[in-house]
Amino acid sequence: MSEFFKRDDCRLCKSKNLKLVVDMGAVPLGDDFVTKEQFDRPQGEYPLEINFCEDCGLLQSTTVIDPDIIYSNYLYETSSSLGLMQHFEDYAAYLMDKINPPQGALTVDIGSNIGALLKGLKAHGMNVLGIDPAKALAEKATKNGLETWAAFFNREMAEKIRDEKGAATIITANNVMANIDDLTDIMEGITTLLADDGVFVFETGYMMDTVQNVVIDNLTHEHLCYFSVLPLQKFFEAHGLELIDIKRIPTKGGSIRGTVQRKGGGRPVTTNVTGLATLERELGFEGMAPFTVFAKLCEQMKSEIRELLTDLKAQGKKVGAYGASIGATSLIYYMGLGDLIDCLYDDNPVKIGMYSPVQHIPVHDSAMIYEHRPDYVLNLAWRYAGPIYRRHQKYIEEGGRFISCLPTVSIFSK
Ligand SMILES: [Zn+2]
């Protein structure tokens, strides 16, 4: 595979009736921040176009970047995200309660990262195995007693697991489904590995939350799909599976947790599934209308922010931005902020001292706000606006101003 390719069909139903919703332009890998010494390293910018499938309703990106480029040096650890460790502890308890697996049954987590979910399941007496392509993370998890194979999960890998460990009672995949181009291969892996009475449970971003809340920073190269119930139901059915439960959860700006079994398996389909499917239909998500509104709101936010920052720049104001994440890169590129902000501020020690992908905007410790004294700080980490504004109360009291871009453009000052 060359660095990337563009597909012309739907990732779930293979239809070619795709309609463009948002064109983000050419965007690099959002988390590819570099050191000064790495400035010469070539970094690609790839087209990021979000399309809607008129046949099954899936919202998706058509550009597929070679996963080796994205994940071989992947450094993101679950523990670095606020509240996620607690989330996985609760998740393990939920699985034990809802699925009620026999003690010592095999649980396989696809894209297990450092093993946050496996740790909880092991504590409940389950036999656990993690699969994750990031070598460093797999080694770290294994060292902590959570056996993890550094590999991509597919049918071949599923056969290997089944041969060595037997069928799995629970297979989980959290924040993984949206990142995989060949979902058919994954589904074949799951049907190969899953015990007859087993379940597959996944968490993934919910399309309706992204669209209704205009979460533009969710649109990244890492997210190939923005799932919803209607296209997933059809897709699972085509693989001899059925969606039996769905739950909306607040993680990552709005997600869903789905439970799937072999078609006609022993568990009933809950009213949650039919309820959310009905809601999606009622809100028109089988057609283009809600996506047209979404695209319009994206454009509106972009022009408001650009106008404001161009104006401030013309007045000679110093403007920084808060947040050095995958999502921040999407926002910077989509709104064309490269020349309008002086630097980025962040609190993550992994990012401080680094430079943004391609444009090399420096990332400073947020404490530097008090030395630089920017007139305005554009908050790209808008989901954490509350904690950030509280932490930098002093900046605000001394006359500093934060600019919120999402959910609406507004200025936060004394
Ligand atoms: Zn489709």
Image (cartoon, rainbow, N blue to C red):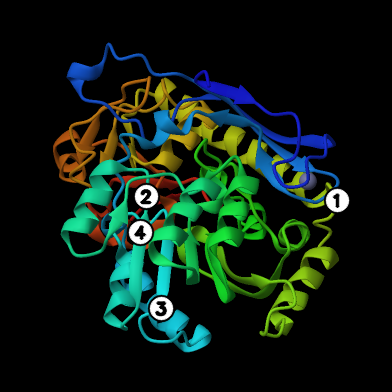
Tell me the SS state at disc 1: loop
Tell which residue pokes out farthest to the top in this image. 40
Mark 1 / mark 3, whichever is N-terminal: 3
Mark 3 = which residue? 105
Q: Are the residues at dot 2 and dot 3 in contact (C-beta closer than 8 Å)?
A: no
Q: Secondary structure at mark 3?
A: loop
Mark 2 touches mark 4? (CB < 8 Å): yes
Q: Residue 132's mark?
A: 2
Q: Nearer the viewer, residue 222 or 216?
A: 222
Residue 140 % position (x, y): 20, 53
Of labels 1 and 2, the one closer to you: 2
Q: Would you say the beta carbon of the disc 1 residue lies within 8 angstroms of ligand 1?
A: no
State the CA–CA distance, disc 1 to disc 3.
Answer: 43 Å
The Cα–Cα distance between marks 2 and 3, rounded to whole angstroms, is: 20 Å
Q: Residues within 10 Å of mark 3 (few under 14, many from 20)?
A: some
The amino acid beneath tag 3 is Ala
Residue type highlighted by circle 1: Gly
Q: Residue at x 23, y 18 (%)?
A: 38
Residue 201, percent across and down?
Answer: 54, 69
Instruction: State the residue in front, 144 or 203.
Output: 144
Residue carrying label 4: 130
Tell me the kind of residue under disc 4.
Answer: Gly
**Mark 2 vs ligand 1: CB under 8 Å?**
no
Kindly tell me whether residue 394 is visible in this rendering: no
Mark 1 or 4 closer to N-term?
4
Task: Give 69 or 318, whichever is nearer the viewer.
Answer: 69
Mark 4 or mark 3, earlier in chain = 3
314 vs 254: above or below: above
Residue to which mark 1 is pinned: 287
Amino acid marked by disc 2: Asp
